[in-house]
């Protein structure tokens, strides 16, 4: 038996569990001279002594003269001889490690599926579901080819109406027409028009009619305009045909195509929208990831209905006008924040209110509403939040109530103009809305009238809701409230730990110890404060003025001039016809 086998046997017999018998299998076949050191050590070594061994154990006398050299034939035979510990040394060792590994895996699985570990299980389940959905969506997209856009060309004359072939009508029928047309819907009785009639297939029954005015200036030119119209009153019809007529004395050609949106497609689109909103509202993933998953699901749905768009079409769907306008507004807000504008005027509101809580709330709400009307309201609230929290600390107020009031009036003020709120930007930038004559000035004039009444109603509701001003006060000073909140967090963390292993019991004890330490700190701090020394109003103002002030006056002047010019051009482009510039360009 080789020296390594002796060492392994010795180590096992001295470190084995008490319930495990000493291995004697194969010992009787060994020479007495080889077996003696091992038996002697097993009999003389106490169990509590450190039995770890190095290359030369203390109490093991290995007969080196009987240990074959590494290159000898005897050593090669000893590699395959039977080991007293585990039979063959290689297979026995791997068997022990396999059993230990299986036990570790079994313990890890049992710990993982405990009820106390439900958050981690839900997280893994969420990631798995989203990964599977992403793979499925990508598989659907790659399994379908891109849909080809096919236009039909028809020559229209007043002598003979042109009737198209049948088209399915189980849903919304969208007609795209390209030719010498005017996009405006205003027409006179003397105008030359092209008329599109939707007929029930194999019948002369007219289901719906649409007219467009011809643009005579480009009638014989290569220029053309593309218009789109949706026929919605086609319920109860399986198939329809289109009839093209005109009162023009000259014939002309138009290009057209028909797209059908089935009712099931609308249902699928609604499901995708609800799915994205669930991801965002419950914060299952970051809202950017939710938007990407939603867009991927939408493209997969279009691909499933054989309408997979090309990359050029997807890029064309991006509303660059809205993005550029929001980008410009956020740059202006960022520049204003660098000057200390928001902090300074919040401090001015505190000085004007002279420390009165409701007066301060009124001024902060008015400021957020006016600023949000011309700047992005979301960014405005983000910049007002730090100084609002600081003012609440000075007045010992609960900042949540003040921030809710600011958010309410920020939304009200942002709705008044076309640039204060992202939905307003999308509405004004829409081409169909612009074609109907609704521009920045028209939108602002009509919205401001209603917003004034909404602001008064909101202010009254807010005053009724906060009629008890004591409810806005914190029961404890800010540092005491923070300590109590921290103690509560440590106790909740300890309560969530279920003691099943030694490590978990240690972790729970550490959490409780931390909570006890913070409770002792709370008692000492309450003893020192005595709540008697409260700074007066003038001292508070001086402390705040040293922290919140205009940091760059020249930058504030330049950014104010730029914002004023931008607002002026917003109105001028609505009233001056010769000013060919749109909102996003400003």
Image (cartoon, grey):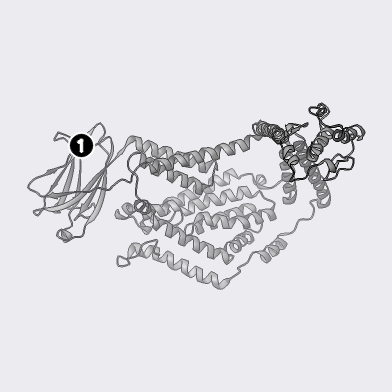
Q: Position of residue 232 (x, y in %)?
A: 27, 39
Q: In which quarter of the image is the N terminus?
A: top right
Picture quadrant where residue 366 is located: bottom right
The image shows residue 288, relative to residue 99, as above or below, that is below
Label 1 crowd bin: few (<14), some (14–19), many (20+), radius 10 Å: many
Residue at image coords 50%, 63%: 331
| Residue 557 placement, left or right of 223 | right
Residue at image coords 46%, 67%: 564
| Residue 239 placement, left or right of 190 | right
Q: Where is residue 3 in the image (x, y as percent from the top left)?
A: 80, 40
Q: Can see residue 363?
A: no
Q: Which residue lies furthest to the left in this view?
A: 159
Q: Where is residue 8 in the image (x, y as percent from the top left)?
A: 79, 37
Q: Position of residue 455 (x, y in %)?
A: 49, 50
The residue wearing badge 1 is 240
Q: Can see residue 110?
A: yes
| Residue 111 placement, left or right of 380 | right
Q: Which residue lies furthest to the front in this view?
A: 73
């Amino acid at each position: 038996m080789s020296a390594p086998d002796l060492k392994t046997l010795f180590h096992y017999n001295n470190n084995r569990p008490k319930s495990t018998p000493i291995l004697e299998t194969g010992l009787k076949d060994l020479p007495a001279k080889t077996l003696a050191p091992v038996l002697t050590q097993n009999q003389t070594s106490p169990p509590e002594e450190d039995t770890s061994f190095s290359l030369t154990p203390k109490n093991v006398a290995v007969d080196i003269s009987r240990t074959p050299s590494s290159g000898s034939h005897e050593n090669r035979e000893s590699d395959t001889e039977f080991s007293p510990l585990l039979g063959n040394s290689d297979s026995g060792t791997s068997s022990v490690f396999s059993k230990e590994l299986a036990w570790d895996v079994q313990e890890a699985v049992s710990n993982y599926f405990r009820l106390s570990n439900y958050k981690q299980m839900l997280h893994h389940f969420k990631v798995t579901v989203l990964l599977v959905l992403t793979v499925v969506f990508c598989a659907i997209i790659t399994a379908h080819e891109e849909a080809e856009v096919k236009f039909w060309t028809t020559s229209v004359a007043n002598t003979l109406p042109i009737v198209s072939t049948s088209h399915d009508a189980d849903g919304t029928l969208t007609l795209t027409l390209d030719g010498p047309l005017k996009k405006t819907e205003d027409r006179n009785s003397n105008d030359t028009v092209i008329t599109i009639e939707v007929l029930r297939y194999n019948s002369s029954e007219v289901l719906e009619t649409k007219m467009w005015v011809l643009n005579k200036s480009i009638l014989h030119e290569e220029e053309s305009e593309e218009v789109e119209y949706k026929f919605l009153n086609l319920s109860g019809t399986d198939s329809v045909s289109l009839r093209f007529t005109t009162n023009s004395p000259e014939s002309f050609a138009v290009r057209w195509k028909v797209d059908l949106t089935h009712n099931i497609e609308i249902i699928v689109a609604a499901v995708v929208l609800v799915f994205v909103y669930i991801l965002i509202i419950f914060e299952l993933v970051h809202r950017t990831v939710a938007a990407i998953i939603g867009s991927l699901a939408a493209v997969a749905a279009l691909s499933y209905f054989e309408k997979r768009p090309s990359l050029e079409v997807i890029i064309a769907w991006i509303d660059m006008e809205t993005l550029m306008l929001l980008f410009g507004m956020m740059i202006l807000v960022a520049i204003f924040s660098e000057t200390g504008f928001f902090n300074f005027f919040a401090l001015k509101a505190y000085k004007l209110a002279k420390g009165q809580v409701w007066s301060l709330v009124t001024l902060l709400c008015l400021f957020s509403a006016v600023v949000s009307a011309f700047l992005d309201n979301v960014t405005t609230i983000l910049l007002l939040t730090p100084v609002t929290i600081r003012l609440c600390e000075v007045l010992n107020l609960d900042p949540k109530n003040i921030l809710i009031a600011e958010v309410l009036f920020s939304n009200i003020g942002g709705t008044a103009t076309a640039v204060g709120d992202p939905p307003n930007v999308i509405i004004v930038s829409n081409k169909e809305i612009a074609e109907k004559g609704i521009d920045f000035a028209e939108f602002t004039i009509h919205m401001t009238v209603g917003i004034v009444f909404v602001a008064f109603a909101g202010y009254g509701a807010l005053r009724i809701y906060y009629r008890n001003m004591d409810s806005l006060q914190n029961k404890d000073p800010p540092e005491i409230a923070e300590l109590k909140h921290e103690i509560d967090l440590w106790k909740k963390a300890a309560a969530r730990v279920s003691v099943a292993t030694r490590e978990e019991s240690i972790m729970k004890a550490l959490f409780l110890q931390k909570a006890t330490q913070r409770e002792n700190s709370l008692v000492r701090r309450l003893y020192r404060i005595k709540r008697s020394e409260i700074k007066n109003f003038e001292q508070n103002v001086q402390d705040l003025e040293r922290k919140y002030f205009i940091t760059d006056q020249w930058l504030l002047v330049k950014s104010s001039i730029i914002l004023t010019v931008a607002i002026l051009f917003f109105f001028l482009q609505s009233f001056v016809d010769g000013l060919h510039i749109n909102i996003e360009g400003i």
